[in-house]
């Protein structure tokens, strides 16, 4: 019997310092006029959380395992590039993606008007359905103080073939 597997991914990025401004990439989209996030890649915590959830569901490491800061060629890489590569790694590991759901916490940007665009871009990157929701934290914590953005994702994957039985204890 092939059972689906779930995974959780979390990603957090602080806003880039004002003396070293960065563009804001969030949910696979560029947000003109918004303060960007600091990070090794583009800082897109929505795409990063989605990729991490996929790795978690498959039990094949995490974002740092596959795209860590020890990979200088990924400096500045787009979140959609990382998500697409994560999806490729997941499929190469014998899984198919059912869906990914991401919620990010931030005061800005106003996400609703661009939700469908973001979901389309991320779904294309993953070659699977990706849904995105947003919320604020009512002024509480680092997101409420406007220090950064956090995202939590869940992913559903399923094996495309029977996984070998464990031989532990034999």
Image: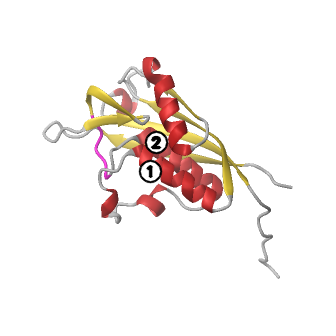
In the current view of this chain or complex, which residue is farthest to the top? 113
Report if residue 60 is visible in the image: yes
Location of residue 12 by image quarter: top left
Q: Residue 15 versus residue 130: which sits nearer the camera?
A: 130
The N terminus lies in which quarter of the figure? bottom right
Number of numbered tags placed on the structure image: 2
Image point 62% across, 44% down: which residue? 155
Q: Which residues are magenta?
A: 36-40
The disc placed on residue 82 is: 1
Image point 80% across, 70% down: which residue? 165
Drawn side of residue 12 relative to residue 10, left or right: left
The disc placed on residue 47 is: 2
Report if residue 135 is visible in the image: no
Drawn side of residue 118 relative to residue 76, left or right: right
Image point 47% across, 55% down: which residue? 63
Drawn side of residue 74 relative to residue 154, left or right: left
Q: Does the magenta stretch mainly form a helix, a strand or a loop?
A: loop
**Residue 108 percent coordinates (x, y):** 35, 24
Q: Are marks 1 and 2 in contact (CB under 8 Å)?
A: yes
Q: Quick one: label 1, few (<14), some, or many (20+) residues within 10 Å?
A: many
**Residue 49 percent coordinates (x, y):** 49, 44
**Residue 151 percent coordinates (x, y):** 47, 38
The C terminus lies in which quarter of the figure? bottom right
Q: CA distance from mark 1 to mark 2?
A: 8 Å
Q: Is residue 114 above or below residue 149?
A: above
């Amino acid at each position: 019997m092939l059972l689906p597997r779930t995974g959780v991914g979390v990603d957090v990025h602080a806003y880039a310092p004002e003396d070293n401004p960065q563009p804001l990439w969030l949910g696979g989209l560029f947000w003109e006029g918004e303060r960007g996030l600091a990070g090794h890649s583009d800082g897109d915590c929505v795409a990063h959380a989605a990729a991490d959830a996929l790795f978690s569901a498959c039990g094949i490491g995490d974002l740092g395992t596959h795209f860590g800061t020890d990979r200088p060629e990924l400096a500045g890489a787009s979140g959609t590039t990382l998500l697409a590569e994560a999806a490729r790694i997941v499929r190469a590991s014998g899984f198919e993606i059912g869906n990914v759901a991401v919620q990010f916490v931030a005061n800005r940007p106003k996400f609703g008007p661009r939700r469908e665009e973001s979901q389309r871009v991320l779904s294309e990157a993953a070659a699977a359905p990706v849904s995105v929701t947003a919320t604020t934290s009512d002024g509480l914590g680092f997101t409420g103080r406007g220090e950064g953005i956090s995202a939590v994702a869940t992913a559903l994957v399923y094996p495309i073939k029977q996984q070998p039985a464990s031989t532990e204890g034999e």
